[in-house]
Image (spheres, rainbow, N blue to C red):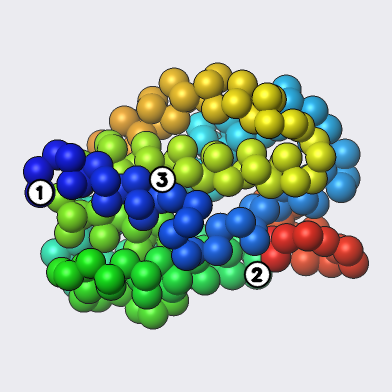
Amino acid sequence: MPETPALLRLMTWLSPAFPVGSFSYSHGLESAVHDGLIGNREELEDWLAGLLAAGSLWNDAVLAAHALRASDEPAELAQLAEFAEALAGSAERHLEATKQGQAFLEAVRTWRGSDIAGLPGECAYAVAFGAAAGTAGITAEDAVAGLLQATITNLTQVAIRLSVIGQSDGVRIAARLEAEIAATAKRASGATLDDLGTGTLLSEIAAMRHETMHTRLFRT
């Protein structure tokens, strides 16, 4: 695909207007804020940087890159989708991944040639997105960088809605994490499934604790 159409498709698929419902998920941030783990810009930035370097966003980056390379191999995609689903460490992480993936696959069928053989109806979002990017001829590094930036932006918006930061601080976080996003995308683009793994235990615990919160704005 020529460079400009590929870029336009990537921007459309990762736009807040694309109907995957990302605005309704906090990835455990709501629980972390409630428990006092995140209360200002610096703490939020550290939290997000950890997810990029050695957390769930790193795993998503590796899964998306692998799915992109296997986009024309249905059997391998099916195994990858099953593996990605098993990586969800809690009920809400599973919900967040599979429901967004399902919504993405339904919406992306608007583009001719975007039906992807091998993927289940409820597929982890990172795998669904990576496979679709592969069929569109988007490079792995661009696709992964876009996915990470969109996720960081969404989580920053979560923090704004929770009154942890304002929009100015949200812009500062986007600027300060830009290099980290690019570096993670480059690293993940050449990684294998053996490089999967996380060390962000507080984030995983926050996702679990969110399941029992009585009052909440977000589904996860």
Q: Nearer the viewer, residue 61 or 23?
A: 23
Answer with the quarter of the image where residue 61 lies: top left
Q: Position of residue 66 (x, y in %)?
A: 28, 52
Query: For the residue carrying disc 3, how many other residues have a C-alpha within 10 Å: few (<14), some (14-19), or many (20+)?
Result: many
Query: For the residue labelled by badge 2, is the local secondary structure a helix, a strand or a loop?
Result: helix
Residue 20 shows up from this direction: yes
Q: Position of residue 16 (x, y in %)?
A: 50, 52
| Inter-mark Cα distance, 1 to 3 | 19 Å
Q: Which circle's residue, 1 or 3, is located before the other in the chain?
A: 1
Please name the residue that numbered disc 2 is placed on.
91
Residue 194 shows up from this direction: no
Q: Is residue 53 left or right of residue 36?
A: left
Q: Nearer the viewer, residue 61 or 24?
A: 24
Q: Residue at x 73, y 26 (%)?
A: 41
Q: Which circle's residue, 2 or 3, is located before the other in the chain?
A: 2
Q: Residue at x 87, y 45 (%)?
A: 35
